[in-house]
Image: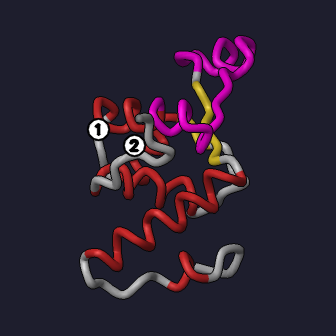
Amino acid sequence: MKSNAPRMTLPTQAVLRALLADPARERYGLELCDLAGLPGGTVYPILARLERLGWVESRWEEPSAHEEAGRPRRRYYRITPDGAERGRDAVARAYRSRRQPVPAWLLHPGGTS
């Protein structure tokens, strides 16, 4: 049976926290790697799983943007509204299971950090 949620590993939680820091903002892959403090080989498979679950959506930037900047084309990711709700809940449950206090930003979405 297929699960509706990813395994809440510490790396998955780190990626979700990076996305949830500003749910309306698109972030490119390497930016998420930096924010999560993880290598691309860890972050990109997590993003792919989250996208398959519908928690994250992605798009490729327009070719003119990266050509003009003289860099490789970026793929941008954004957490979906449903993904933000489920992600906050999943990360909060993971904190509780480790008997750690749940951060206020998980309990009060849309508030200040």
Q: Which disc, if any, is residue 39? A: 1
The answer to if 71 sits in the magenta stretch is yes
Image quadrant occupied by the N terminus:
top left
Please state the horizontal and vertical placement of residue 16, each as a whole percent of the image. 47, 54
Name which residue type carries label 1. Pro
User: Start and end of the magenta stretch?
Assistant: 48-73
Image quadrant occupied by the C terminus:
bottom right
Q: Residue at x 54, y 30 (%)?
A: 52
In this orientation, which residue lies closer to the viewer: 84 or 105?
Answer: 84
Q: Residue at x 69, y 22 (%)?
A: 61
Q: Residue at x 54, y 66 (%)?
A: 88
Please state the horizontal and vertical placement of residue 99, each as a whole percent of the image. 26, 84
Whether pointer 2 and pointer 1 mark residues with C-beta atoms closer than 8 Å, the reply is yes
In this orientation, which residue lies closer to the viewer: 66 or 50?
Answer: 50
Q: Which disc, if any, is residue 101? A: none
- The residue singled out by tag 2 in the image is 33
Which residue is farthest front? 1
Q: Earlier in the sequence, mark 2 or mark 1?
A: 2
Q: Residues within 10 Å of mark 2 (few under 14, many from 20)?
A: some
Please state the horizontal and vertical placement of residue 72, each as a whole percent of the image. 53, 16
